[in-house]
Image: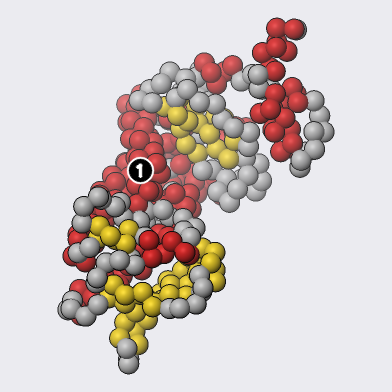
């Protein structure tokens, strides 16, 4: 026992925080009681393409069956269910079945609230033949790689992307909304310094950037109104671009400000937001990022469609 106690002492602050989370700030039970050995999950970590052989799903939430592979060399935090395939299958196959459209529709019959492995078992998930199973596993790992890239890399440019993915497993909802371009050392300035933009408004700004909208003023022409927690600024494109190009610039600028809003950007930092010195470079940068994201989304949808077709064919046979 002294050896176990000495070992757990290393994790005492973390375990105390866990107990406080359970008890709404109170240490209502011994801190060491939050320890959960979970040796079966440690064993389920073969590191196949960077993924463990167990899946995680939230215990509570709007989407009862948002399920995904766990990264290798990790264990789930409190609040997540861990799912394993046991001795009959593996986690990638489970994720493919559970996230497939046919099973998602079937799962609507589950009662709301906490969903565990017994609930998944009650759905009567089938075990397909070896060829179908391996094809599903391959597509699931492809999807896992794509989701990791979308969430950890693409979301730096498209900050609303993780929320869209959580809300829509099919990823058919619009994903190209708020946008934050990656600034470069050369050829870039700020919203407040580039010559092709003017920023109007004298009152104090504070808080965060909240939203923006393009306004077509019959007297003064187009402008982008930026609303902050306190204060508003008007951004105008200098005269020069043709009508269509001007419209494209306002659309992209609206997305840039939307990116600031999505990341809770400081209102006082609005004028310091990075933007190319050449307006055409802004449009080119946006177009390049759009093509890159579209390719990932298409690959995601193709892998999901492949899984759906495999599941439907397997269920019909």
Decide which of 207, 136 is in the foreground and name it.
207
- The residue located at (32%, 62%) in the rendering is 190
Report the residue marked by disc 1: 153
Element on which disc 1 rests: helix
**Picture layout, residue 31 above or below residue 111:** above
Instruction: Locate residue 84, reporting x and y percent.
Output: 53, 25
Give the quarter of the image for residue 148.
top left
Q: Is residue 170 left or right of residue 28?
A: left
Q: Is residue 178 left or right of residue 39?
A: left
Q: How is the image coloured?
A: secondary structure
Q: Is residue 105 among what the camera can see?
A: yes
**Picture layout, residue 202 above or below residue 20:** below
Decide which of 299, 204 is in the foreground and name it.
204
**Picture layout, residue 23 above or below residue 208:** above
- The residue located at (25%, 60%) in the rendering is 276
Decide which of 252, 144 is in the foreground and name it.
252
Instruction: Locate residue 118, reporting x and y percent.
Output: 62, 32
In the orientation shown, which residue stands out farthest toward the right? Answer: 28
Q: Is residue 262 left or right of residue 59?
A: left
- The residue located at (74%, 36%) in the rendering is 20
Q: How many marks?
A: 1
Instruction: Locate residue 104, reporting x and y percent.
Output: 49, 46
- The residue located at (39%, 41%) in the rendering is 152
Which quadrant holds the C terminus?
top left
Give the quarter of the image for residue 27.
top right
Instruction: Locate residue 95, reporting x and y percent.
Output: 46, 35
In the orientation shown, which residue stands out farthest toward the bottom? Answer: 219
């Amino acid at each position: 026992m002294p050896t176990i106690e000495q070992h757990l002492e290393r994790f005492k602050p973390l375990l105390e925080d866990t107990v406080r989370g359970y008890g709404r700030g109170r240490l209502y039970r011994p801190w060491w009681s939050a320890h959960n050995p979970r040796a079966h999950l440690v064993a389920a970590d073969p590191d196949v393409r960077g993924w463990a052989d167990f899946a995680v799903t939230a215990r509570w939430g709007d989407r009862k069956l948002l399920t995904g592979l766990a990264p290798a060399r990790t264990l789930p935090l409190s609040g997540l269910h861990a799912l394993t395939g046991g001795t009959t299958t593996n986690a990638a196959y489970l994720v493919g079945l559970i996230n497939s459209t046919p099973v998602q529709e079937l799962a609507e019959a589950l009662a709301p609230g906490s969903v565990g492995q017994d609930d998944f078992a009650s759905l009567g998930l089938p075990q397909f033949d070896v060829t179908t199973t391996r094809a599903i596993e391959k597509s699931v790992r492809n999807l896992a790689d794509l989701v990791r890239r979308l969430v950890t890399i693409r979301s730096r440019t498209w900050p609303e992307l993780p929320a869209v993915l959580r809300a829509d497993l099919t990823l058919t909802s619009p994903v190209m909304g708020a946008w934050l371009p990656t600034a470069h050392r050369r050829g870039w300035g700020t919203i407040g310094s580039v010559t092709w933009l003017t920023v109007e408004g004298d009152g104090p700004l504070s808080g965060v950037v909240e939203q923006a909208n393009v306004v077509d003023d019959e007297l003064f022409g187009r402008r982008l109104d930026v609303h902050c927690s306190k204060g508003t600024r008007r951004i105008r494109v200098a005269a020069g671009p043709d009508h269509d190009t001007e419209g494209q610039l306002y659309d992209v600028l609206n997305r840039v400000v939307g990116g600031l809003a999505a990341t809770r950007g400081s209102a006082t930092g609005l004028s310091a937001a990075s933007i190319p010195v050449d307006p055409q470079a802004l449009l080119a940068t946006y177009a390049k990022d759009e093509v890159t994201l579209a390719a990932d989304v298409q690959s995601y949808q193709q892998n999901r469609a492949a899984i759906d077709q495999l599941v439907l064919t397997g269920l019909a046979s």
